[in-house]
Image (tube, rainbow, N blue to C red):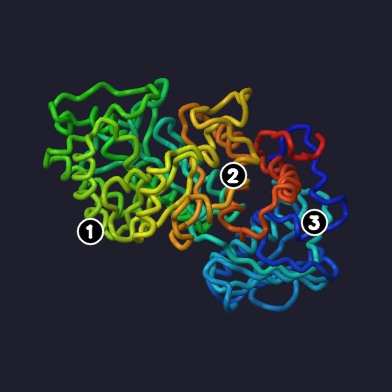
Amino acid sequence: MAAAGISLTGAAPAGTATPMSRVVPAPASVQPGGSPYRITDSTRIRVDGSRGAREAGEYLADILRPSTGYRLPVTTRGDGGLQLRLGAKGLGAEGYRLTGGSSGVTITASGPAGLFHGVQTLRQLLPPAVEMDSVQPGPWLVAGGRIEDSPRYGWRGAMLDVSRHFFTVGQVKRYVDQLALYKLNKLHLHLSDDQGWRIAIDSWPRLATYGGSTQVGGGTGGFYTKADYREIVRYAASRYVEIVPEIDMPGHTNAALASYADLNCDGVAPPLYTGTDVGFSSLCVPKDLTYDFVDDVIRELAAITPGRYLHIGGDEAHSTSHEEYVAFMDRVQPVVAKYGKTVVGWHQLTAATPAKGAVAQYWGLDSTGAEEKERVAAAARGGTGVVLSPADRVYLDMKYDRDTPLGLDWAGYVDVRRSYDWDPGTYLPGAPSSAIRGVEAPLWSETIVTSADIEYMAFPRLPGVAELGWSSASTHDWEDYRVRLAAQAERWEALGIGYFRAPHVPWPAR
């Protein structure tokens, strides 16, 4: 839904096609030229016989029908119109090729994810009013030319903290759709912390029913049943977004410790916690029961997670000694492997011995000490993958400036240019570029309560992180990007996304 009073004139002047050069993230190759294609009431969406093409065609039709008012049947017969086809060579699992001219637009890809990403580009080539859920006047022009595109990194993610404040299945789905628009492919869900346990575990039911019963500042909290979680996973998969679940341990565990007294070394359960301090809780590393608990949780979570990864946290374990931390990680990482998943941990995991193939998520600052950075870089040289989430660059819960009404500032203010203007390939000294798996933008929820809060903090920074993950370093240019970013604003307004009108971006007048 468009916000009241917003005029949708499109990113390009009325009656002209949006230039291919306006797309976010920037495509690998753009060759504009030729006449535009006009979608009309006689347009068909033509797909090959594959399931992937059919699903992408139906998804595209669902976007276009409300705003155009056209039938846009999805068919395997005929030529011209909007064509979606698998079988292209040399584009990788997520790449695509889009060609447009007066007779139609064709998207080809090697795999269904690429076809889906091509559809996202097609959306951006249409006027922003295409996102409305009521009939709009058009015209619906797609620029002529050719785009050939594939991502720089395979991990292009966002993280949503559902522990400090709980977000419903519907709210998570809404965020998934926003990630998909910019070709992000991972959603990391922070499912447990001191303030709340958010996933049902059958063998330890009080984790959710008691440990999930509150949140920061009080309130009723909430949790996902296994059916809820499966629905999130299914919906995300339909948008080619992989869910990466996180159970943070051995610290950030007060909700679990409050739920089961025997998990505490002294056998006494602490009260539920609704504040925002960190570092005060720890699982009891010497207790065998701790590892029965960890095994059960990982087993049940892995069974409902089709994706490759399971995140075990590991940050801010200030109440765990170094020796106990190392012993804990040595016992827990093999449990993840036993249930068929690859370990992901915050970069403090590198203070222990990361398992073979593990991924460390770096959340330090530009100012983080050389010793800590070198420890992560050394692990990367030894085969550990690295996902970059520097807090003073891409933590979406950091305030934009001193006047931002939401968010925190412990990592400093993170304006839109700062979140965009860095290169993941060269960010971590000593880490080989081959070890960098990609980027992820976390959104911690100490101050985030509603979907409107999520969107205000994510937009306009999230698309820039998506571009860092997708686009080649050679396309990286702030002056060009800020113009392309400004052209996204009317699309967000059509989608009902409230955003921060950051200075230094030439937003359209309201």
Which kind of residue does numbered mark 1 sit on? Answer: Lys
Q: Is residue 316 visible?
A: yes
Residue 73, relative to residue 452: is it above or below? below
Sequence-earlier tag: 1 or 3: 3
Q: CA distance from mark 2 to mark 3?
A: 22 Å
Sequence-earlier tag: 2 or 1: 1
Residue labelled with disc 2: 462
Q: Is residue 134 visible?
A: no
Q: How many marks?
A: 3
Residue at 22% of width from left, 53% of height from top?
335
Please state, as top left, top right, bottom left or bottom right, where the C terminus lies in the image: top right
Please state, as top left, top right, bottom left or bottom right, where the N terminus lies in the image: top right
Q: Nearer the viewer, residue 5 or 287?
A: 287
Q: Nearer the viewer, residue 238 or 322?
A: 322
Which kind of residue does numbered mark 3 sit on? Answer: Thr
Residue at 19% of width from left, 49% of height from top?
331
Which kind of residue does numbered mark 2 sit on? Answer: Leu
Q: CA distance from mark 1 to mark 3?
A: 50 Å
Per the rendering, the mark at residue 18 is: 3
Mark 3 surroundings within 10 Å by alpha-carbon count, few (fewer than 14), some (14 through 19), many (20 or more): many
Place of residue 478 in the rendered image (x, y in percent of width and height, measured from the top left): 70, 48
Sequence-earlier tag: 2 or 3: 3
Residue 235, relative to residue 498: is it above or below? below
Q: Are marks 1 and 3 in contact (CB under 8 Å)?
A: no
Mark 1 surroundings within 10 Å by alpha-carbon count, few (fewer than 14), some (14 through 19), many (20 or more): some
Q: In the structure shown, which secondary structural element does the residue marked by tag 1 occupy? A: helix
Eye-nearest disc, 2 or 3: 2
Per the rendering, the mark at residue 338 is: 1
